[in-house]
Structure formats: structure tokens, C-alpha cells
Image (tube, rainbow, N blue to C red):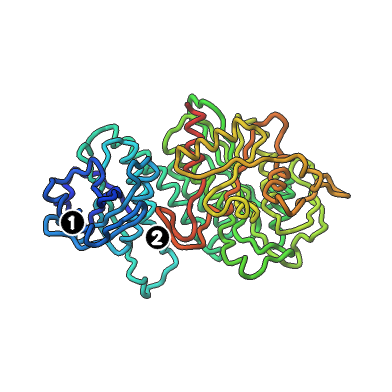
Amino acid sequence: MTSLRLSTAHPATAKSDALVVFVHPRKSGAVLAAGTSVPKPVASKLLKLLRIASPKIAASEVVVCPSPEAVSADLVVFTCTPAEPDTEAMRRAAGNALRALSDRSTVAIACPSTEPEQIAAIGQGARLGAYQFTSFRGSGDRDGRTGTDEILLLVSDARSKSVQSEVKKSELITDAVLATRDLVNTPPSAQSPNDLAEAVRKAAADTPVRVDVFSERKLAREGFGGILGVGQGSINPPRLVRMSYHPAKAQGHLALVGKGITFDSGGLSLKPAASMITMKCDMAGAAAVAMATLAIARLRIPVQVTAYLAIAENMPSGSAQRPGDVLTMYGGKTVEVLNTDAEGRLVLADALVRACEDEPDVLVDVATLTGAQTVALGTHISAVMANDEELRDRVIAAAGSAGEQMWPMPLPPELRPSLKSKIADIANIGERLGGMMTAGLFLSEFVQDGASWAHLDIAGPAFNEGSGRDYTPSGGTGAAVRTLISLARQLAD
């Protein structure tokens, strides 16, 4: 994992393989970002170099050049932001620069800001941009991508307590995002439901978070029919993980629920082969909830958190649930399964009922739930639905402050009749059009009256099937982790 270190070293003389410099576009040519602490002669040489290499550099672009004699690093990397960048623009610019330097061991960043929050954001963007998942590579060629070992954040007041504090907090959040990415990228052959549960237990070992794992026997004994129904077709039995963090003087109680389908074949309602390739990512909601909970504890945010990870593998076999089966969910409600590929809502429903028994102030579930989410909002923006508009707005505000994109979506009552079943309390699918919202309506049926609940559908943003962008890699992204931590801070405040 790439480390980050604050340093008071001068950008021109810092010992590194590459130096990152922020610039802004101008009609007359790019200029160094205000606050970049290099002498005028060095600045002049840097800008001359940039104008030769890229006369019309634009925002979000990166230009890599051999260094002039005035700079110790081998390379200079110009990363361009808008003329008046906000914190998120700085985070993305840093990520863009580091993605271009995957073969450089040590990278120094000339911070153009003295604001602790922006300094921390630049460090976060850099580490997120430097991320690579290499756990399953053999000893063969890695296309020259050796990875960045250390990032030096060059700040004149690096010894400032406020800067160090903000960077330390940001580092804990970054660690949680990176750990989530690792879990999402792990192939299903190495991540059964029990493997995922044990990985969470191991990750919590250095925290005050208690982790309880419900075996298939306990799930059967207590009536978790949704989780058991989805998992019954696999030789790898399902699990429910309960995480609890209860600090002294907690300012509220946040319950989190995550969908943890370690592989989704669709069950007997089998997906097309091409649609299965990325289905290791169907546990991204559970991974985000788990790592956000641990980060909240490590940050010592004074809010009680109870989290449930509903984990199963959805496979076809002679023992798999069938279209037409009726499941009795935790709490007693019955569901007619019309499509076994609408399995995420079944495991979430059990966990939502159980979470409501803890009487939290706020309940939030996170899931890669529907393909309809990507149709509605694409792959960069998550959807937020809720039975409480104030909570929905708070979640979106938390996402914005954390640098994630989320958008409010309704739960239209007009769609509820399409979920009616002729033989059970409810069917697990409704109208195809508006499928993201019918899924949300289904989940709302398992939320206790009076509970304040929000549903985050992160199907598109959780896994990037294309090329990397800004600080977002190809593969698992860690979507929703920063939002959940930001929401916990809101509650604590």
C-alpha cells in the first residue's frame, strides 16, 4: 500500500522520482497554481517546459516531462485544475497525476494550498490515484507497473498540528476506501461468504468494533429466510455479520446494512455469460459498510453504529431456489420469488428487519442493487431513495462534502401494485420500467413504521468496467465509504 508523508522539503530539491506541480489554464498559457512555493527562476523554467510540451493544456489533463536542471526529480508532472478549483477538483487532479506515475517509486507533490482540508484532499486523491490491485499477479511481467511506494506531500507548514490532524483523519478514510477496493476486486474463488465474514473479523481486530458472525444454522434457527433462500444453491453457505461500535457519550445511533453477494450468477434465472464477468463486485455494499464502520471507530466519531452484512453466493444447482418459490423472511413476511436474479433485495430485507429491532435513529442500506440504476444515472452517480426526505437530503449533502456524487430518486406509490403476489405478501419483482424504484419500494416494506431509512443504489459507481479516471481506478472503486463516514460525522455533530 502506498504511504503518505508530510515534508517541508523544497519542491525543486526534494528527493523523488517525480515532482507533481499544479497548474491552471489561461488563454495566454498555463500558470502555476497560486501558492506553489518555487522561486521565480524555477517557475519560469517549469512554465517554459510546459508550454513546449503542451501549449494548450486544459483542466483535468496531465503532462509528464523530463525535469529541467533546476529540479532534482527525474520527471515533472503538470496536473491541470480549473482556474478556481474546489477541494474535489484538487483531489481529482492529484489522482490524475499519480495514475500517470505507476512506474515511479517515490513521488513528491508541491502542494499549492495552505488550507489543511485541501492539503488532506490532495494527499487522499494521490493515494487513491496510486492504487493498484496486485494480490493475484504471479511472478511474470506486470507491464512495468511497479507501483508508487511513497508520496511526499510538500507543505511549508507540515509541522502544523491542524495540518497533521486533518491529514491523519483523511488517511484513515483513505485506508477504508482502499480496503473496500481490495475486497471488491478479490475473485470469488478466494472470497466465499465465510471468507468475507472472516476478512471483516480480521480487519476489526485492532478496533473496539465487535463482530458476530451468524452461521447457516443460526440463520435457520432465527428464521432468516431471505438470506438462506438466496444462498441455498451454493456449496458455500451464507452468513450474516453483525458489527457493533458503541463509544462512550455517543451522540446518536446509525444502523447500516450492506448487500454482500460474493458472486451473482443470477441463480436459476441465469444471467448471460458476459453479464457475470464482473459479478464478484456484487458484495460492494457490504464491503463499504464494513470498512466505513471500522473507519468510524478508528476516527473515534462519537456515534453508535450497528452494521449488518447480508452475505450469500447466488448459484444455480439442484438445491437452488426456484422462480415460484415462497420464502418466509425474518419477521414473518412472505415473498414470492418470481426472479432469482432479484436476490439482493431478499438478503437486504432480512437484514433491514433485524436492524430495525435495534431502534436506530437513522437506518441506511447500501447495495449494488439494480441494473436500472445505471440506466437512470449512469456509472458515476449513485441513487438515494428514502422514506424521509430530510434524511435523503442529508445523505446527499454528506456525499457532496465527501466528494462523491449521489442523486435523489423517488419511491412512487404508483409502482407498488406491481409488486403484488397472488399467493404471498409481496413479489420480489415488479414493473420492469422504473426497476430501481420498485426495488426501493420492495425494501421499504421491510422497514419498521416510524424508522428513518435511506437506500443507496451504487450499482454503477461501485465497479468501474472502463479505464481509470481522476482517482478512480479500473475495478472496485470504494463507492459510498466516504459518504457513510461523512454521515456519521453529521450525526455526531
The picture places residue 128, in percent across and down from the top left corner, at 39, 52
The picture places residue 389, in percent across and down from the top left corner, at 63, 32
* Residue 132, numbered circle: 2
| Mark 1, other Cα within 10 Å: few <14 / some 14–19 / many ≥20 | some
Q: Nearer the viewer, residue 367 or 135?
A: 367
Q: Amino acid at mark 1?
A: Lys
Disc 1, SS: helix
Disc 2, SS: loop
As drawn, 451 above or below 257? above
The picture places residue 292, in percent across and down from the top left corner, at 49, 43
Q: Residue furthest right?
A: 422
Q: Earlier in the sequence, mark 2 or mark 1?
A: 1
Q: Nearer the viewer, residue 124 or 189?
A: 124
Task: For marks 2 and 1, give the one nearer the viewer.
Answer: 1
Q: Amino acid at mark 2?
A: Gln
Q: Nearer the viewer, residue 224 or 286?
A: 286
